[in-house]
Image (cartoon, rainbow, N blue to C red):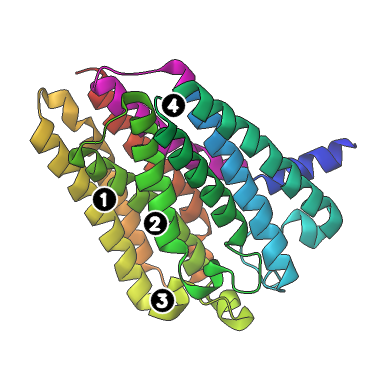
Amino acid sequence: MTNNSVKMWFETARPKTLPLAAASIITGSALAYWSQQFSWTTTLLCLLTTLLLQILSNFANDYGDHQKGSDTQERIGPLRAIQQGAINVKQLKQGLILVVFLSLISGGLLIISAYQTISDVIAFALLGLLAILAAITYTVGTKPYGYLGLGDISVLIFFGLLGVGGTYYLQTHQLNWLIFLPAIATGLLATAVLNINNLRDIEQDRKAGKNTLVVRLGAENARIYHCILLATSALSYIIFTFYTFTHWSNFLFILAFPLLIKHAYFVYQNKDPLNLRPMLAQMSLLALLTNLLFSLGLLVN
């Protein structure tokens, strides 16, 4: 394998999306630490499994969009490896299968190390298989849900409720309704990243018949929706912290709010999709920063 092909595979894995995937594990583990039931083994296996699932989703997204002709030279975002001819369809499919296999191994080790009851094994095995299926069918298949405008709800569930809640449960083996507040907040920030991506690609997606939520809402409403996502996320963090307040350090995440407000204002004001290109990476970093500050506020308690 040449250095160029290694680089193309690295780019196809989209490393810039991986910190966002890690954010839910960081938050779930910080909540477990806050509950005095933290496990390094479970945290690391959760992190590995989540990163593999994110890479799987990225591979499947490239494969599915190529099969449906959604990725064209009109694409505003960076050209993908398969568009450039650096990786062919057969190779990408083989890579996809390999990552599925690695995800199954990592997920299996996670369940074996963390389970307490047979119910845990069954529930998390089913959730793991569902996560793999969801990662693939976002753009692959006869009726991929990403083309039906259901990507946002999927991101909220897998990056928020399951990512945070599942990581917390596997370490504490209990669920508190309060945990779902930061879980929702984390999921909404991840959804905002997808929304920026879809706002940027709205014209191309519309032409390709990819009816994302942005295409369905229209650009103006999608910009308002973006602001609502960020505001609701912030409110969820605040409500959780008021309910569980022990020290002012719990509110460290508020330090990210001026940046989130500035970002939301820029997205709302700029109607040219080209201007949104740098906003995708920025939103991903802001989501990670907010989650890190929230988690740090729990750890230094």
Name the mark nearer the viewer: 1 or 3: 1
Marks 1 and 3 sit apart, C-alpha to C-alpha, by 21 Å
Counting residues from the start of the chain, the first of labels 4 and 1 encountered is 4
- Give the numbered dot on residue 219: 3
In this rendering, position of residue 71 left or right of residue 245: right
Can you identify the residue that label 2 sits on?
192
| Element type where label 2 sits in the image | helix
Name the mark nearer the viewer: 4 or 1: 4
Is residue 92 within the magenta segment?
Answer: no
Counting residues from the start of the chain, the first of labels 2 and 1 encountered is 2
Can you identify the residue that label 4 sits on?
115
The picture places residue 5, in percent across and down from the top left corner, at 84, 42
| Element type where label 1 sits in the image | helix
Q: Is residue 178 visible?
A: yes
Identify residue type, mark 4. Answer: Tyr
Q: Is residue 86 visible?
A: no
Marks 4 and 2 sit apart, C-alpha to C-alpha, by 33 Å
Front residue of this view, candidates 112 and 152: 112
Q: Residue 227 lies in what quarter of the image?
A: bottom left
Q: Residues within 10 Å of mark 3 (few under 14, many from 20)?
A: many
**Majority secondary structure in the magenta region:** helix
Can you identify the residue that label 1 sits on?
233
Residue at 12% across, 31% down: 244
